[in-house]
Amino acid sequence: MTGEIRWGIVGPGRIAESVMPDFGVTPDARPVAVASRSQQRADAFAERHGLERAHGSYASIVEDPDVDVLYLATPHPQHHAIAMAALRAGKALLVEKSFTATTAGATEVVDLARETGTFVMEAMWTRFQPAVVAMRELIADGAIGEVRSVQADLGVAREYDPADRLFALELGGGALLDLGVYVVSFAQMLLGTPDRVVATGSLFPSGADAEAAILLGYDDGRNAALTTSLRYALPGAARVVGTTGWIDVLPRFHHPRTIVLHRTGAEPEEITRPQTGAGYAHELIEVTECLRAGRTESAVMPLADTLAVQDVLGQAAEQLGVRHTEAVGVL
Ligand SMILES: NC(=O)c1ccc[n+]([C@@H]2O[C@H](COP(=O)([O-])OP(=O)(O)OC[C@H]3O[C@@H](n4cnc5c(N)ncnc54)[C@H](OP(=O)(O)O)[C@@H]3O)[C@@H](O)[C@H]2O)c1
């Protein structure tokens, strides 16, 4: 694709609202359309953000010939059906985390993306944060030796409301898919796909998970200890431990500004890398650049990693007794 990349927004909820200003600092990206289940909500969003077209159904934006890429910002179980329809219509996709509600759903989307040669990326914005990029460069340069262990936590105290998507099982509710995806993706980025997953935790009355501790094990002894919760707040800290030091990723690690490098025998070194915009611009830049370069996936957030993360989340959910399903009749 050449020239400006034309974006369509699907699901004008909280995150879509937060991401919109970052299009303004993303070169060659132009948001042109929005789709809601309600024409009224689509019209209001389009007016607020100066978009050219407002679609009163998801099916309608999928068929819009003047949109190159869709940003899916609905609850997780709705991603699968919209993504499948969009890929069949030849639309590239940026899909909010969690990519889908189930591993089977994620696999179907990735298979169709590969079959059709269409670009798809999970909106795991953490991987594109400048401080995380700096951390990965330090690790690649051997600053802390071999990475052996990752610790990360992310939790918020939210009052139980079974109607809210965070707690409603049919909307993919629970800590795992909303926040656990960040700790799992962070560990997977640094250690690769684990050989074992052990999870323990508790559920809300809706059957969605309220809190979880997840241990990732690797056959060579490396490990990750991860915690997530919707029942209580957690600092949002991460620590990457190597054989000759460690790196603290200061809260909140899923969109950090500062990391602290602790090399064995040296004074700690603080490294700060501010975000552009609210921090979403970096993933928008990645998608825009990939599309202009004709790539079908991102090297920073590859589809294999998305599948590996979804599989860990699925295993953890199963061990906790949580049953997620993909939504049907979405379009
Ligand atoms: N990257 C981040 O920092 C970040 C932050 C928050 C959330 N997220 C992710 O973004 C996605 C959306 O989260 P959100 O907090 O923005 O959710 P939200 O405020 O509830 O908005 C979701 C939107 O999806 C649409 N939708 C479609 N089917 C729906 C259904 N059955 N029930 C409710 N809404 C439905 C609704 O728009 P219409 O009905 O108007 O079409 C709604 O406004 C989730 O996957 C979440 O994990 C990412």
Image (cartoon, helix red, strand yellow):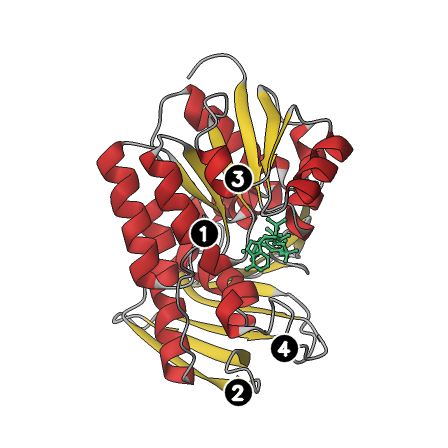
- Disc 3 crowd, CA 10 A, few/some/many (<14, 14-19, 20+): many
Instruction: Name the residue rendered at 55%, 52% in the picture.
Output: 74
Residue 71, numbered label? 3
Disc number lying in front (4 or 2): 4
Q: Ligand 1 appears in which quadrant?
A: bottom right
Circles 4 and 1, Cβ within 8 Å, touching? The answer is: no
User: In the shown orientation, is residue 246 left or right of residue 224?
Assistant: right
Of mark 3 and mark 2, the one earlier in the sequence is 3
Q: Amino acid at mark 4?
A: Pro
Would you name the residue on which mark 2 appears?
202
Front-lying residue, 174 or 183:
174
Would you name the residue on which mark 4 appears?
162
Disc 1 C-beta below 8 A from ligand 1: yes
Instruction: Name which quarter of the figure residue 18 lies in.
Output: top right
Alpha carbon distance from label 3 to label 2: 32 Å
Residue 249, numbered label? none
Kindly tell me whether residue 323 is visible in this rendering.
yes
178 relative to 92, above or below: below
Residue 79, numbered label? 1
Of mark 4 and mark 1, the one earlier in the sequence is 1
Circles 4 and 2, Cβ within 8 Å, touching? The answer is: no
Element carrying mark 2: strand
Q: Amino acid at mark 3?
A: Tyr
212 relative to 34, above or below: below
